Amino acid sequence: MGRSSREIRNILVLMVVAMTAGSFAAAGNAAPAMKALVGGTLVDGTGAAPVKDAVVVIREGRIACAGRRAACPVPKGAEVLDVRGSWVTPGLIDAHVHFGQTGWADGRPDSLDLRDRYPYEQVQAGLREHPERFFRSYLCSGVTAVFDVGGYPWSWSLRARTAGDTDAPHVAAAGPLLSTRDHWLNVPAERQFIYLTDEKIAREGVRYLAANGTDAVKVWFIMVKERPFEEMAAAVRAAGDEARTLGLRLIVHATGLKEAKEALRAGAKILVHSVDDLPVDDEFISMAKANGTIYCPTLTVVGGYLRMFDAAATHKPPVVDDPNGCVDPVTLAHVAETASLTLDTAVIQQKLERTRARFAAGNPVMADNLKRVLAAGIPIAMGTDAGNPLTLHGPSVYAEMEAMQADGMTPMQVLVASTRTGALALGSAGKDLGTVEAGKVADVLVVGADPTANIAAMRKVRIVIRGGAVHGVAELAPVR
Ligand SMILES: [Zn+2]
């Protein structure tokens, strides 16, 4: 009741498309036929003004034409999808994910240790064998490309596996991380953390990553009290120098201003977290600009830890923010299990309070720094850090984009960060992605509300086109 006839017509159109999409899926990965999305408002990801009554022609998995109806006539024989009343955008790109993590504590026993129930080596083997549930939750949420910026060596294999698969997002991968902290979270025969003891190890580590054809070199620059800062900084600079020599981009996790500036000195091309302790200063800004660094604010990940500890402390199941029902049943069951865990109350309370304090102190600084970075014209990419507890693979992008908007970016700026700049963050893996322009891979969304009015509109993604293959979101949601 109360729906306008226009809304009803749109719903009918989308239902028809959802049904047609099912038959495409049944045809597997065969080269999709020529299609035209007709009559929607095109928001192409470049930041250009939206184009009303647009046509997007898709041929052999690529965009053949996108623009005004007069500029992009519908070719004879094209299958027409009537998307009047909807918005057409590029597929979203999450520039910060980890397929080696589950979205719950079983993948991060350093957050809550559940290894007696979920042995870590078994969790890892499961993640390696079955990444497809996450592939699906990404596509279902409108995410058509992701950057795995740190994990086990098997994460590299996801690139080839997903490249031609229209049922999975494109995956770029940085492989094992070079870490200033000797983290224990490895499995006996494989490492996701290579300990950056000194400059020699740093260079050897980078050469190992290069030999595996990595998409980037990721450094985890954690302040370790027991180590002199200069010792860690020298190792990070050596990693940056070796990466530059080998033509690889340096990605750094650095949340404090001091280590973030050291990362920029080392040549970091992407910072995958906000600076959350101090305001970024002029030196930070000028170094980032000189490097062409992309800033990925990753605003919501700490909130996930907070919600998990809160659920464990209060025995109330955490709320799952998954508007299109994209998350798989096993992940949902694990998340719900948080409420019934029997853990040391004092330990949980301490974790909860510590995280709450970090969240309260860090959030305003992150918001302020995002404004400074934005005003300086530094490119910003959207990234969730999905895989961390309660930052679920796929639908976490909505809260992240909304947080970027709440911190002062316009909806259009957030959309560009989540599409074109995300593709830039992927490097050569992203060169044909990120915008709805002729020649690009046809990774396109049809959305039921205006994302330039409010980025929360992306929750209303209805159709996901990946490499020209059309999927209704309902078809991508797991069967429950
Ligand atoms: Zn991360």
Image (cartoon, rainbow, N blue to C red):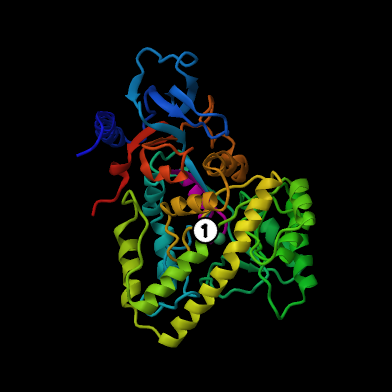
x then y, percent, for residue 461: 37, 41
Q: Is residue 23 magenta?
A: no
Q: In which quarter of the image is the N terminus?
A: top left
Identify the residue under disc 1. Answer: 385
Magenta part of the chain:
143-161
Helix, strand or loop at label 1? It is: loop
Q: Is residue 282 above or below residue 422?
A: below
Q: Residue furthest left?
A: 1
Residue pictured at 33% horizontal, 21% vertical: 79
- Drawn side of residue 116 relative to residue 422, left or right: left
Judge whether 39 appears above or below 23 on screen.
above
Q: How many marks?
A: 1
Whereabouts is ligand 1, in terms of quadrant?
bottom right
Badge 1 amino acid:
Asp
Q: Is any atom of residue 114 visible in this view?
A: yes
Of 141 and 314, which appears nearest the observer? 314
Mark 1 residue CB less than 8 A from any atom of ligand 1: yes
Residue 224, image x and y in percent?
68, 76
Name the residue nearer the viewer: 103 or 303: 303
Q: Residue furthest front?
A: 2
Mark 1 is surrounded, within 10 Å at the Cα level, by few (under 14), some (14 to 19) or many (20 or more) other residues, namely: many
Q: Is residue 286 above or below residue 361?
A: above
**Can the viewer see residue 211 in this picture?**
no
Q: Does 299 sit left or right of 237 as displayed?
A: left
Among the 4 quarters of the image, the one containing residue 83: top left
